Image (spheres, rainbow, N blue to C red):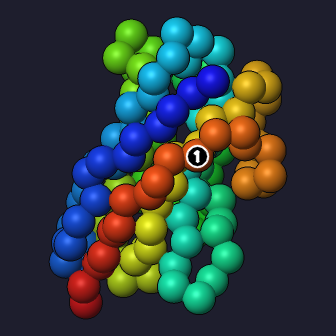
């Protein structure tokens, strides 16, 4: 099993940057595909970005492509989401997720483990 803990959220002005971190417990972190999702108030949880076990395959939602970067450090059991040029519509709770298959996926149903989430608020 994997336990996930997000950090790095906060309040930022539009145009600013934040870096989210997701620390994983367990000895097999490097074998998991990781993803970031977000959920705004009253809306469904949606895909943001995903990265395979090696970091060699990434995928992004169109709404964040070119602004967000997902990366991972398997030696530190951590996945990151660098968020630049933030917009008010990026405001949401951001969740880290892990799946035990080596293929990236945009579907939240494909992920077995979830963190508790971290709030990101972008003011205009």
Question: Pointer 1: residues within 10 angstroms few (<14), some, or many (20+)?
Answer: many
Picture coordinates of residue 8, whole percent (x, y): 26, 51
Residue at the image point whose x is 44% and y is 73% from the top: 92
Between 19 and 77, the residue placed more toward the observer is 77
Between 18 and 66, the residue placed more toward the observer is 18
Q: Is residue 43 left or right of residue 11?
A: right
Q: Is residue 109 left or right of residue 89?
A: right
Between 20 and 61, the residue placed more toward the observer is 20
Q: Is residue 89 above or below residue 62?
A: below
Residue 80, quarter of the rendered image: top left
Residue at the image point whose x is 51% and y is 85% from the top: 41
Residue at the image point whose x is 67% and y is 76% from the top: 44
Report the number of numbered marks. 1
Quarter of the figure that contains the N terminus = top right
Secondary structure of the residue carrying numbered label 1: strand
Q: In this view, does 1 lie above or below 123?
A: above
Picture coordinates of residue 95, whole percent (x, y): 51, 55
- Residue named by callout 1: 114
Q: Is residue 51 above or below residue 1?
A: below
Whether residue 65 is visible to the viewer of this picture, yes or no, is: no
Residue at the image point whose x is 80% and y is 52% from the top: 109
Quarter of the figure that contains the C terminus = bottom left
Whether residue 97 is visible to the viewer of this picture, yes or no, is: yes
Residue 21, quarter of the rendered image: top left
Picture coordinates of residue 103, whole percent (x, y): 78, 29
């Amino acid at each position: 099993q994997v336990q996930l803990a997000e950090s790095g959220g906060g309040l930022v002005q539009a145009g600013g940057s934040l870096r989210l971190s997701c620390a994983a417990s367990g000895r097999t972190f490097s074998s998991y595909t990781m993803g970031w999702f977000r959920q705004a108030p009253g809306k469904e949880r949606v895909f943001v970005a995903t990265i395979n076990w090696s970091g060699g395959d990434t995928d992004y939602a169109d709404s964040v492509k070119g602004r967000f970067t997902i990366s991972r450090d398997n030696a530190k059991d951590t996945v990151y989401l660098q968020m630049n040029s933030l917009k008010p519509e990026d405001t949401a709770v951001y969740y880290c997720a892990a799946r035990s298959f080596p293929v990236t996926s945009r579907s939240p149903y494909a992920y077995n483990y979830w963190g508790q989430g971290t709030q990101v608020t972008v003011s205009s």
